[in-house]
Image (cartoon, helix red, strand yellow):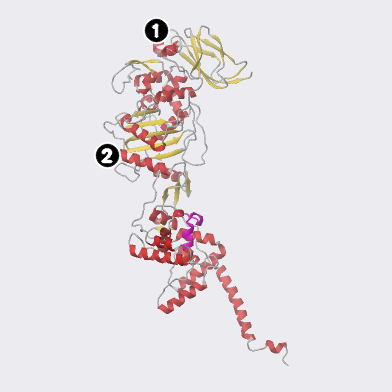
Amino acid sequence: MAGPHRRWRSPLRLPLLGLLIAAVIAGKALDQWVEDTRLPQTLAETSVEVRDRHGRLLRAFPVEDGIWRMAVRSEEVDPTYLRMLRAYEDKRFDTHFGVDPVAMLRAFGQAVWNGRTVSGGSTLTMQVARLLEDGPTGRWSGKLRQIRVALALERKLSKTEILNLYLIHAPFGGNLEGVRAASLAWFGKEPHRLTAAEAALLVALPQSPETRRPDRSVSAAREARRRVLNRSQDAGVLTMEVAHLAAVAPLPDRRRAFPLLAPHLSDQLRATAPAQARFDTTLDAMLQARLQAVLSRRVKVSGARLSAAMIVADHQSGEILVRIGAPDYTDTARRGYVDMARAVRSPGSTLKPLVYGLAFDDGLVHPDTLIRDAPVSFGVYAPQNFDGAFRGDVRVRDALQMSLNTPVVTLTEALGPSRLMAAMRQVGMRPQLPGGKPGLAVSLGGVGVSLHDLVQMYAVLAAGGTAPRLTSETGAAREKTPRVMSPVAAWYLGDILRDAPAPAGARGGMLPYKTGTSYGHRDAWAVGWDGRHVIGVWLGRADGTPVPGVFGAELAAPVLFEAFAVLKPEIDPLSPPPSNALVLETAELPAPLQRFRARSDAFSEAGAGAPEVLFPPTHARLSLVEGRMALKLRGGRLPFTVLANGVPVAQGLRSRDLDLPSPGPGHATLVVIDADGQSARVTVEIEETG
């Protein structure tokens, strides 16, 4: 009778034990072999992207060697494409450990039976291993390396991470890598919107990306797509009807260009943050494309070498919606590579509204004040109107609407050109003076500004005297400019400029706007606003040479009105007049505001000194009781008129020790005007205590 020891010594037991030990040793060796694998770099460089406010692509930059490789995740890709990819390339992807023994045995058997390779046994993970290392596919050594890396990848990464690597690195012909670059290049769309026909082609291309390119071999591309569709139908991914329709769908016959919207802004953003991979902007890609087409059409019919620029902004939020530096970035004849939205040029007459707004606040004039349009000289400087004619007495509103030069220079002299320069900086502009010291010609365009700066200034006017600083980057701080004028003065400007003559065929009386033409006909400008948006337009030559016969009113204004029509179907209404706005005819105004008198006129006729405010001192903080404010004056000729923030609070005053009603809490600019039109001005902060 055999005991336990005899059974253990059976001839079958020792070989089995040896096999078991060998398997354990082999398993540990395999495990160590996989563990010791040096993985390739998985963090590949992808294209730098600039996107709009909705996440749409404005522009992308290729990576090294001009390769288009764009970041993408599986959740950003059409689910049907992912199911078709698994059905065709690796149907057990979600369950295997990097290698699919069933697929490899099938491929080996088919190769032996047919004497050639019929199908591959590589899993998606093995393909990722090859793509990361750019290794060979046919040699056994290369295949063994892929298996080792695939096994290691499965240990280090999740299935989703491996799939994402495939979606980024798979080749699609030429310099295209990754499904997102391929989808944009072949179909002009993001991969989350693929049709079944498009998805099938993108599944088929990586197996032989050059021979199956639809722009080179339609028959090879169609046959490869058909095979993918058939297998997807067999796997239940597609119905028979969908697969049939997809099989007869047309193939793309050319590659599409990648989006090139707002290229100048893209260059600027990338230069300021070269290590950043993605820039999210406030721009609207669809609106950018439509208005870029408007500019392109306009310059083509307006003359050779002509360029143009446009900025559209929301003056309530400060967000820039459109920023066009040139109609065509690639047009070298028009120097499209020059960003004319940032170029410093002469603004012509577009600064005039700022002068008038400051004059309103200083109590120098009211929109219906009469001002003299006649020959005038300031030393050797004698400004002339654009047409060389003079019109005598005109209302201030008419002088601004007709863009007369002598009245605005007279007001600039009264304000002081340094005051105008300071106001320009307050609104967020960066003016550049050719001579370093401001002169009276500043108000007529004798200073360099950019379109961006000009739109910033008009945003302040449109928003009532202060506005957020314009930005094109999402998440930027919404810092407001200092208040440069009162809401009343800003409303006066809108009320005046909306009655400026509209271009032929455009509806007038709705859109406040101002045009400008620089000296020598080099620049044509038009800037306008409604209750929500402000648009600035520039046309001219990027090299600064004159454009004979160019005028802002004739060339730029029609583009401005067309831009508003593209932006929205109806103009947003302007804000109603502030409660303290003075809406009166000329004869009803206080006497000092009925006619503007220059300081030189007042001195020559009256011989008296200008009034001087002794109390309160400028920048004083006053705590007022019962809403009354003391004002002490010296000099000037009686009677006096006192304005607070451009609005008369008292007139006909025949004393230099005054007790006046408070204009209300907050900052207030007080202006005292005497009988000769001479004035004094202080700015105070008022606190009312009861």
Q: Return the mark for residue 514.
A: none
x, y percent for residue 461: 45, 28
Task: Of the two numbered discs 2 and 1 on the same chain, state the one appearing first in sequence.
Answer: 2
User: 254 left or right of 179?
Assistant: left
Where is 346 relative to 89, above or below?
above
x, y percent for residue 204: 41, 63
User: 656 left or right of 450?
Assistant: right
Q: Nearer the viewer, mark 2 or mark 1?
A: 2
In the image, farthest residue toward the front: 241
Query: For residue 404, what is the image quadrant?
Result: top left
User: 103 left or right of 397?
Assistant: right
Residue assigned mark 2: 304
**Label 2 is placed on what type of residue?**
Ala
Q: Residues within 10 Å of mark 1 (few under 14, many from 20)?
A: few
Residue 76 within the magenta-colored segment of the rendering: yes
Q: How many marks?
A: 2
Q: Return the mark for residue 605.
A: 1
**Label 1 is placed on what type of residue?**
Glu
Label 1 sits on a secondary structure element that is helix
